[in-house]
Structures are given as C-alpha cells and as structure tokens.
Amino acid sequence: MDNEANEQAIKDSFFTIVSEQLPEISSEDFELIGRAYDYAKTAHAGQLRASGKPYFEEHCVPVAIHILELGMDSILTCAALLHDTIEDTTVTVEDLQKQFKKDIALLVEGVSKLGKIKYRGNERHVESLRKFFVSVANDVRVVILKLADRWHNLETLEYLPKEKQQRIAIESIMIHAPLASRMGMGKLVGIINDLAFPYAYPDEYLKAKKIMDSLVKNANETVKKMHRDIAVDLYNSLGYSPKIDERVKGIYSSYKKLLRKDWNVEEIYDLIAIRSIVATVSDCYQALGVIHQHWRPVPGRVKDYIAVPKPNGYQSLHTTVFSGDGRIIEIQIRTKDMDDFNEYGLASHHNYKNSSTQKGTEKESFAWIEQLRELQNSELTTADYYTHLKTDLFKNRIFIFTPNGDVVDLPAGATILDFAYAVHTKIGEHAGGGRINGKFMALKTPLKSEQIVEIITNSKAKPSNKWLEMCITNIALSSIRKSLKTQRLNQ
Ligand code: MN
C-alpha cells in the first residue's frame, strides 16, 4: 500500500472506532472530530516519530483511540487528536480557540504544560510532584489526556534511547500510575505499570516474570475447573448465568506483592482471580454464600469492599478459597456498575451511583482525590459534571522548586524558612537566607508558586524566638520550638 492509501485506511478505521465507542454521537460532534482530525494532520504534516513513521497517524490517532477506549467523550477525542499541536507545531492556543470550542483549546494547552513536568528520582518529594501535576492540569480531563498520551508513549518506548526509556518508565510508575489509581482507573494503572516495568527495573522484571509464568501454568487446570463449577453453582442459585472470567494479576503488582512477602510465592493468593459480575448488590452476597458452601474460605481473607469501599472508590467482594486440590484461589464478586467504576474510575461517568454511603478508611494522600470523588458521586448531569471537575483543589497551596527541580508543596503564605524545614529539618536549623530565582532574600520572605528557591545554610545560624514569627507551617514551628527547648536545657 502506498502512503496515501495507508493513511486513508487509518482514518477510516479511526472513524469506525468513533462510531462504535460513541454510538449516540450527534452529527455535529462527529463533524467536529472530523475537523480536528484534518486540522491536526495538516499541522503535523511531514513530522515523523522515532520509529520513522508519520507522527500524526502513529501517535495522535492512537492516543485518541485510547481516550475512546477509556470511555471519554467527543470533546476529549478532539483534544487527543490535537494534543501535541501547541507543543510540536506552529499552532497556538489562540488558533485552536478560533477553530474549535474553547474547551478543546484549553485541554490541549493544559496537556502541553504537563509535558514540562519531570520526575527527577527524588522519592522524598514525589507526593508534591503528583499534586503539582494535578494543579498544573487544572482539569481532571487534562490528567486523563496526559495518561492516554503516556500509555501510547510507553507502548512505543522501544524506539527511544536506553536512558530515556528508563527515565520515562520510572516516571510513569512514580507519577502517572499512582494518579490513575487515585482516580480509580484500575485498568489504566495496570496498563501503565506493566508497560513501564521491563524498562524501569529490567532485572526485577525478569525475576518476577519467571515466577509468575510457572505459577500461572501450574494453576491453569484448577482455575478452569473452578470456573466451570462456579458457573453451575451461580446459575442454580441466581437463576441466570453471570459473566465470569479469569484475571491474571498484572506483572508489576505481582512483583510489588512478591516484594512485600519476601518473594515467598506460597503467600500470594490472588495471582489468578476468578471474577463474576452479577446483577445486583444482594446477588453479590448470595453468590458469596453459594461459593462458601462449595469451597472452604481461607480464614480472615473475606473482604467486603462493597460495605467499605477502598479510598479510591473501588467496590467488590473478595474471598479466597481452598480449591480442594491443594491450591488457594481468589474469587471476586461485583455488579456491572462496580466493575465499570473499578476499571475506569472517574472516566466511567455513565450513570454510576454509589450504592453505599459508607466511606473507606482515608489515608491523607487520598484526601484530595476524595473531593473529586464526591463530585463523581453527586447528582450532576454529564455536562455539569465536567465543568465541576476543575481541579482547583490546590488553590491554597503553592509549589516551590528546589534548584534540582524537585517540587515541594506548601500552604499559601509560607516563607523561605518554611521551605527550608520542608526540604529537611537540618537545612531548616541552619538556614541563613535563601535565593528566590537567584536573588538573595531574607528568611521571612513569603514565597509564590513556581519560584525556584535555594537555601543558603550557615553553620552559625540557629533557631531563635524571632524565627517563630517567620514561618507558618506546623513542621517548621514545632521543629523550632523543639530546638529552643533544647537550647534552654543546655544553657
Ligand atoms: Mn503526545
């Protein structure tokens, strides 16, 4: 096939996918996607990917397909087609605003800003970096767009130089996958981690893969037989055939579990799970009872995430049973709504209603995504839902860069001294002053978001009573009080 025919074939198959994934799309929106397609293709004309293939067809189109696979709408599909135009072509945000809806232009602008955020390997500040990422995105849809972009970049990592492969892979595991997890997009978490793992930590990957392959092979017969038996049991009890499938745990999450269990494979029970999707919540509990009558449950391993969902909204019943032939197998039971939410999270906006009013145990790091989830569960129409999904959750936080490019998040009003303590107590204790964007400033100077701040330490500097008026964060204030107390005792 010549190039032109090939490109037409890609276009045709893309619009077939659009029609399949958005069956109720209006002709207006269909036309809008068509315009975005042609506009982005023209903008990227002549550009090639690292693979040597045309940039638009081999990157922008696959990203848009991923957006559709994640259950997103026509606006995000347009933004996906256009997502690299601001960064990589002469197109400006104003051009996009003139040509398309304002929303689309803002989404593309947002994703372009995210392209500049890099993880530099400092785990101490990784949580601040995740918050900064969401704050810069300023809209959950921008984060989802960036995740789809990253998904495709990871699929084509083989064409990049080795150091770049590893940097992108580790960044994806540290930043992108955790964000997908907090948005409840379980399917995407697995995809990102499993694509990145072999490049991020090649030795660990090979070790885990070897163990996994042999475990899966050994358990295969047992799982097949149990699958059949569960199908019969549930049909007899519920009066219909629920959807049942077998899920092999992803390689990266298996590896994390192996690490936690000291590579003791006997302690990994959920390597292969049998999942059944039943009609109602009460059917979930009925199915659990039926399964426990047939197979003895492993004590202490029945988990009711329906009554008590995980912090990111995940709901399901889990049980682990003795298979009768010496194996232990996990069984998961849930409704279709729960399954959609567990797999697609915030992206699965279609008619999801939380069936439970109880909330899971909340870790602090989930608090901000919890606010997003409350929006998700409130009675908003799809259109309202999107406009309310603005992530101005961090309007009271500022994000400060260290000279190394790490990000530290602080409350608005925080000073150089607060920053010094946030970086490290020892640095706080000997802070003499700081440079803001290269300019020397006093410790009490309040900071503004996205400034680069370098602390000047001085071995003679030490906390004094005056310091208590120079900062606002608890971490700084309590460290200073502690030092003052020690100073008094030593006098
Ligand atoms: Mn891209």
Image (cartoon, rainbow, N blue to C red):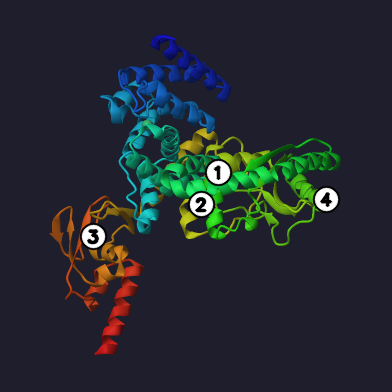
**Sequence-wise first label, 4 or 3:** 4
- Provide the residue designation for mark 4: 294
Check the image and report above or below for 385 versus 443.
Answer: above
Q: Can residue 467 be seen in this view?
A: yes
Q: Can residue 391 be seen in this view?
A: no
Query: What amino acid is labelled 2 in the image?
Result: Glu
For the residues labelled 4 and 3, the Cα–Cα distance comes to: 65 Å
Question: Image quadrant for the N terminus?
Answer: top left
Query: What amino acid is labelled 4 in the image?
Result: His
Q: Position of residue 342 (x, y in %)?
A: 59, 43
Q: Is residue 232 left or right of residue 462?
A: right
Do callouts 3 and 1 mark residues in contact (Cβ within 8 Å)? no
For the residues labelled 2 and 3, the Cα–Cα distance comes to: 30 Å
As drawn, the label of residue 370 is: 2
- Provide the residue designation for mark 3: 446
Tag 4's secondary structure? helix
As drawn, the label of residue 186 is: 1
For the residues labelled 2 and 1, the Cα–Cα distance comes to: 16 Å
Residue 52 sits in quarter: top left
Name the residue located 30 percent from the left edge and 63 percent from the top edge: 423
